[in-house]
Structures are given as structure tokens and as C-alpha cells.
Amino acid sequence: GAVVSQHPSRVICKSGTSVKIECRSLDFQATTMFWYRQFPKKSLMLMATSNEGSKATYEQGVEKDKFLINHASLTLSTLTVTSAHPEDSSFYICSASGLLGEETQYFGPGTRLLVL
Amino acid sequence: AQSVAQPEDQVNVAEGNPLTVKCTYSVSGNPYLFWYVQYPNRGLQFLLKYITGDNLVKGSYGFEAEFNKSQTSFHLKKPSALVSDSALYFCAVRDDTGGFKTIFGAGTRLFVKA
């Protein structure tokens, strides 16, 4: 149980285009979803926390107009990187928690984004 | 403010030997503590957590961790390492004040040599 999927697993795009990454909880309802960014050989940086049906809460320094997060249902959250630039190239990982207050996060396999 | 420290960038151990990956933390309230493992180009997999109860927590793949409140530590251990345990390990902490934010350590790369 507690499986989280991400799509696509890898994407290459041109600078200036937008990229959408999907995160799905396959066998549970995810009240809260998290989006992280991981740089090579570095820890995870929390970008934002989203609760189903409400606006995402962004961490300090994360541009909400650039990284659009939508959590429209209890099984799906999307991260859209708008007007992507090469510095946005990274490994993006989502995670999901079930019940409100549920402590454990279940992680997706990650999406490798390369912006040319 | 919450923080978590993994003092070792890398741990090397021979197969069959016991392993320890260290983690210390700081929180305002009571800690929720987690260990996750990451294999190359993959997301994180949950190993174990401490919320309350017994200080020794047993998790997946034969791993266990001991919560030590006085030393504010939550070290990950395994009695006998396998080559397949080689991966990146993250300690994480969240406090019990009601927020969802979990802070991750910098990660410790474990190499198990055959």
C-alpha cells in the first residue's frame, strides 16, 4: 500500500517552455502533498505544501508564479514549471500523506527535468 | 526551529558487519523522527519512524533505530550489512505542534563492500 507515482519520470524541454509534472497517490487519498527539489548530492528542499482544494503554501524563496501547484483532488497534485530556464533543471520529487496529521510521507519516484 | 544533522557524508562498512548511520535533531516540541532510503535516480522509501513508545524502533529490511531523548539522537542501525544496503539515507524530523513541515538531513551515503 501507500504507492505514489509521478509522471513523467524524465523530461527534456527548451528554455521558455512550461512543463507539468503529475503526482498521484494510487491506493490512498492524499490530503496533503509536498513538492521537493533535490540537487545533485544534496538533500531535499521543500518547495511547497498543498492540501486538497486549497492554495499551496510555498517555502521562502520559492516563486509561486513560476512553480504552479494544483491539488485538485485527493489523488492528484500537479507542479507546473512555467517559462523554464536551465537553472530549473533538477530532480523534482513529490510526496503524499493520507489523513490530516498523518506523520509518514510516501514519496514518488521523482522526475528528472532538463531544460536546454 | 526544527533542524536535523547527519554528521557523516559517507559511511563505509564491510558486508556482514554492523552498520550505524548517525542522526541528531532539534525541535521545539516532541519529535516525530523518520528514516528514508534513496536509491539512484529514485524517490525516497520509508524505512521507519518514531512517534512515541519504545525507544527502539524496527523497520523495513532489517533496519532499526534508537531514539535517545537525552542525546537528541536517532541513529539508524543494522546488525549485518548487505551490499544491497548501499544507498543514500536521510533522517527527517517533524515536531508535534501541528505543522506538516518535515525537515530532512543532508543525507549519508552508505557503501557496503563485499
Image: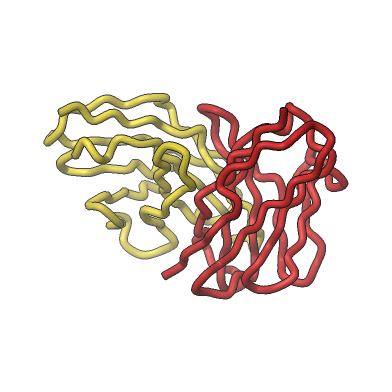
Chain colours: A red, B yellow
Please say if A32 is above or below B80. below
Of A109 and A19, which appears nearest the observer? A19
Of A21 and B99, which appears nearest the observer? A21
The quarter of the rendered structure image containing the N terminus of chain A is bottom left
Please say if B70 is above or below B55. above
Most extreme residue toward the left is B16
Of A40 and A5, which appears nearest the observer? A5
The quarter of the rendered structure image containing the C terminus of chain A is top right
Q: Is residue A115 left or right of residue A111?
A: right
Name the residue: 73% across, 65% down.
A71
Say how many tags the image has. Answer: 0
**Looking at the image, can residue A16 be seen?**
yes
Name the residue: 56% across, 67% down.
A25
Which quadrant of the view contains residue A85? top right
Q: Percent x, y for residue B88?
A: 40, 36
Please say if B102 is above or below A53. above
**Looking at the image, can residue B1 be seen?**
no
Q: Percent x, y for residue B84?
A: 24, 40
Name the residue: 87% across, 46% down.
A65
Please say if B106 is above or below B73. above
Q: Percent x, y for residue B81?
A: 19, 38
Which quadrant of the view contains residue A100? bottom right
